[in-house]
Amino acid sequence: MIIVDFFVKMIVKTLLPEVELTNTQLNILEDVLAHTKRLLILAPPKWGKSYISAISGLLFAILNDNVEVVIMSNNSKQSKMVMGYIKNLIERSPLISQQYIKEHFSVPRPEFSDDKIVFKNNSKIIAAHIHDKLWKNVLYNADLLIVDESVIIDDYKYRNYVMRTVKKDGIILENGTPIMKNHFFNTYNDEDYKVYEIDYKLAVQEGRLSLKDVEKMKSLLSNTEFVKMYEVKFVDDEDALYSHESIKKAYKDYNNFKVPYKESVKMVIGVDVARFGDDSTVITVLAYSPHKDKYYIRRIKQLTKKELSSVVSNVSYIYTNYSKENMYKIVVDANGVGAGVVDMLRERGYDNVEEFYAMAKPFNKEKYENIKTEMAFILKKLLDDGKILIPKDSALIDDLINIRYDYNKYGQYRVIDREDKSPDYFDSLLIALYGFKNLLNLNENDIS
C-alpha cells in the first residue's frame, strides 16, 4: 500500500507538477489506477469531487492504452465543466500536451474538443450527458465511467442509460452530495462499492474548505440542509420507520460479529412465498446468540423459481445444512399459496413448522393494527438498541429504508409497504423474527 501510494504521488508530481492533492484525493486516485471496480465519493460542495474525478479520468486514460473514459452527468454544462478541468490540466502540463495528446490542441479539431479528447495511445475521454438527443445513436463502451453529481440524475435514466454505458468489467466512479434518497442512496448501501465519506470537518482539516465559510453556510441553511450538504448524511423521511443510522450500524457491526465457539444458538427459517407478478420467494435464516444477546442473519436466499416444490426443497436443504446448530423453527407466510408450502413441509416430517398471517391480530391490540405491524416495530426497537445485526445486503436495506408508517382511524400504528414493489426481503425477516416470539416475550401485553 505504501509502495503504491508512493507510486501515485510520483505520477502526479511528474505529469501534473502544479497539482496538490489531499490524502483523501490521493487515495481515490490510487483506487482508480488500481482498477477498483466501484467507487463512491460523498462530499460537501466545493470540496473538489469533480476535480479529483477529472484528474482520475485523465491519468487513467494516459496510463492505459486503448481505454475509453466517459464522463456522464445530468446536463452538458456539468460534463463540459469536468472536461474543462481536464483540458486545463493538460494545458498546464507540457509533458502531457507534448507526449500524450494525439495532435496539438491549439487548433480546434475532433481529437481535442469540448466533447472528446483522443490520446496517442488510442485512449479517449468523452463528455456525455443524459439529455443528449443523440444518445440512442451513440454506443459507449466505457472502461472508466465517471458519474458526476450522480444524485441529481433521474432514477430511470440512471438505471436504463447511465449504467449501460460501462463495460461489464469496467470501473464506475460516482460522486455527489447526499441531498436525496434515490439511486445514489442505494449505491451508498451497495456492498460492492468502496465509499469515501468526506464531511466538512475532514474537508476543513485537509484544507479544502474554510471553517469560516462552513459556519456562514450553517447560518444560511436549515439544520436538515446542513446535515445533508456539509455533514454529508442521508436524512430520514419523517414517516420512515427505520433510521438510516440504525441500519448502517447494524450492517457495520455485522462484519465484526463472531459467535463464541461451540455456543448453542437458536435458529429460525423465515419464508416469504411469492404470490404473483414480480414477487420473489425469499428465505431468511435468523439466529439468536444467548451469550451476545443479539439476533443476526445467517443467510438470505432469493428463489427465482416459483414452484412450491422448489421452495420446499430449498427450505429442506437449508434446514439440513444447519441442523447441528439447533434449528428452532420454520415459519412460513401461510397466506394464499404459502399454505401449500406449510402442508408439504409437514408431509415431509417437519413438525416445527409454524404459520404466519400478516393481517392476524397483534399481541398488543391497542397499539398495533396487525401482527405484521407489531413485528415491524419490534424490529425497529432491536435495530435502535443494536440488538439485531444484518449483512450489507442491498435488497434488504432497500426494503428497510422504504418502509413507512402512519396511524389508522383507531389510533393504532400501521405499516405502509413500499409502493414500487413487494418488500419480500423485509417480510421474510419479519417472518423469521416472529419465530422468536416466546424469546421476545410476545405473550405479554407489550414489549415495546
Image (cartoon, helix red, strand yellow):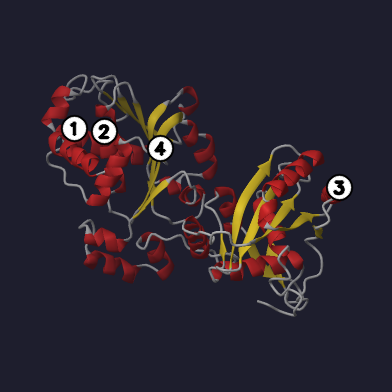
Q: Residue at x 74, y 46 (%)?
A: 315
Element under label 3? helix
Residue 181, percent from left and from top:
50, 55
Q: Which residue is mark 2?
A: 58
Kind of residue at badge 4: Lys
Residue 83, percent from left and from top:
28, 35
410 sits to left or right of 61 = right
C-alpha gap between disc 3 and disc 4: 43 Å
Closer to us: mark 2 or mark 3? 3
Closer to us: mark 4 or mark 2? 4
Closer to us: mark 1 or mark 4? 4
Kind of residue at badge 1: Ile
> Can residue 307 be seen in the rendering of this structure?
no
Q: Which residue is mark 3?
A: 340
Q: Is residue 95 above or below residue 146?
A: above
Residue 350's label in the rendered image is none
Q: Is residue 29 above or below residue 144?
A: below
The numbered mark, 1 or 4, whose residue comes first in the sequence reads: 4
Q: Residues within 10 Å of mark 1 (few under 14, many from 20)?
A: many
